[in-house]
Image (tube, coloured by chain):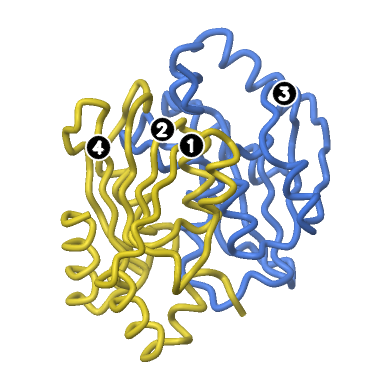
Chain colours: A yellow, B blue
Amino acid sequence: MAVALDEARAGLAEGGVPIGAALYGADGALLGRGHNRRVQDGDPSAHAETDAFRAAGRQRSYRGTTMVTTLSPCWYCSGLVRQFGIARVVVGEARTFHGGHDWLAEHGVEVLVLDDPDCAALMREFVERNPALWNEDIGDD
Amino acid sequence: MAVALDEARAGLAEGGVPIGAALYGADGALLGRGHNRRVQDGDPSAHAETDAFRAAGRQRSYRGTTMVTTLSPCWYCSGLVRQFGIARVVVGEARTFHGGHDWLAEHGVEVLVLDDPDCAALMREFVERNPALWNEDIGDD
């Protein structure tokens, strides 16, 4: 979670939505890391998990891989995990936003929710200060 | 569907996976169009629907929008539609691949499957010639 949290903080420092993620191979090697880039790149498709997935480049298989993310993955990022057969998702916290991690667990993905206070504090403060931007990021109008 | 099919054919001409998509606003205006860019950009996150969504840039709301895609959307792209509240999905065909469009319909998205023979022929020929690439694109190992 340290890498994902570093990514989230980097995103915040750039003026963006502070969510970070990292994708690890079955052997524990880091394949890709990233963070939300909606603001920085004007790219609504760059959620933390998709940014880490993209950074990992083309992979023949996602068997045994683990996605670590500071926040419960939204439906878009949950769909990514399910489609590509990512084996495990480690979620920093699901207090400030409850995405699709229960659905992933129902469909055979190993899900671990850490309820990490640093991840939760980062998002709580961000959402309090930037409610419109946060709502835009999750398509909530 | 003409725009999405043009995108799919452009992708094929570039040596890529021939799936195209276009996102339209509630007023019918084209917001963004795109195609799968796994091969061209080495980007596994660039499915047709996410590429069109990205091309549309930041939007405050997706209320009333329509995603037109040549192929049934995979879980990743179905998750995109659900998360952002895209109202309607027009699917070229679901014969060569059956993604998450039933799930979207269950969750209130208006889904129209055209069963278009041009869309189906394009994918069928591609999958026959490039089974490994197609399996990679949908995370099937």
Q: Which residue is mark 4?
A: A24
Q: Which residue is mark 2?
A: A87
Inspect the image, locate mark 2, and give the three-letter code of the amino acid beneath it: Ala
* Chain of residue at mark 4: A
Q: B1 left or right of A92? A: right
Which numbered disc flags the more N-terminal residue, 4 or 1? 4
Q: Dividing the image into 4 quarters, which one contains the N terminus of chain A? A: bottom left
**Residue at (52% x, 8% y) in the render:** B129
Residue located farthest toward the top when viewing the structure as drawn: B129
* Chain of residue at mark 3: B
Callout 1 crowding tier (Cα within 10 Å): few <14, some 14–19, many ≥20: some
Mark 2–mark 3 Cα distance, whole angstroms, equals: 31 Å
**Residue at (73% x, 66% y) in the render:** B28
Inspect the image, locate mark 1, and give the three-letter code of the amino acid beneath it: Val
**Secondary structure beneath disc 1?**
loop
**Secondary structure beneath disc 3?**
helix
Q: Which residue is mark 3?
A: B120
Which numbered disc flags the more N-terminal residue, 1 or 2? 2
**Residue at (40% x, 83% y) in the render:** A127
